[in-house]
Image (tube, helix red, strand yellow):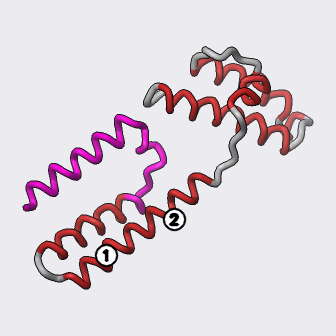
Amino acid sequence: MPGFLILLAAGALLWAYATGRLKNFTYEDGAAAILFLLGLRFLTTGKLLIGAGLMAGALLWGAHRRRQLSRSATMPVEDARRLLGVAENATLEEIRTAHRRLIARVHPDTGGSAELAERVNVARDTLVAEMNRRTPRAS
């Protein structure tokens, strides 16, 4: 049984790496994953209450993190392209260059506003996220 759990965990890690889902991975996420596996082990050895509690805690942490990550500001991809002035098939380097050029003009330290700088950052993040959805591990 432990061999199967190790293979299952390795497969899940490989899938998460290949799809780019490990980019926002924190130590707390790792602790939650370990607690989930420990809970699964307790469940399979007959300690149902402890196992269920550990697994429920890990699942609650996962739901919290998913909600936390989905709250980040986004904008439509077309608006982001228009704001940064890049083409639909722009590369990651072109997006970053356009972002640097624009952020140098609108940053609060250079006389711009925080709201404009935030919009430019959100546009860059939106386009990079779109690239990651199309081609895993673009950034």
| Mark 1 Cα shell of 10 Å, populated few (<14), some (14-19), many (≥20) | many
> How far from the left and from the top, in percent, is residue 94?
64, 17
Q: Provide the residue span drawn in magenta.
A: 1-29
Provide the residue designation for mark 2.
64
The three-letter amino acid code for the residue at tag 1 is Leu
Dividing the picture into quarters, in which one does residue 36 lie? bottom left
Is 118 placed above or below 6 here? above
Dividing the picture into quarters, in which one does residue 22 lie? top left
Residue nearest the observer in this picture, 72 or 104: 72
Is 38 placed above or below 120 here? below
Q: Left or right: 125 with respect to 48?
A: right
Residue nearest the observer in this picture, 5 or 117: 5
Q: Left or right: 35 with respect to 67?
A: left
Q: Earlier in the sequence, mark 2 or mark 1?
A: 1
Provide the residue designation for mark 1.
54
The three-letter amino acid code for the residue at tag 2 is His
* 120 part of magenta stretch: no
Q: Quadrant of the N terminus?
A: bottom left
> How far from the left and from the top, in percent, is residue 99?
71, 26
Dividing the picture into quarters, in which one does residue 125 lie? top right
Q: Left or right: 41 with respect to 69?
A: left
Is 63 placed above or below 39 here? above
Residue drawn at point x = 72 percent, y = 24 percent:
81
* 14 part of magenta stretch: yes
Residue drawn at point x = 28 percent, y = 40 percent:
14
Q: Left or right: 1 with respect to 55?
A: left
Residue nearest the observer in this picture, 44 or 108: 44
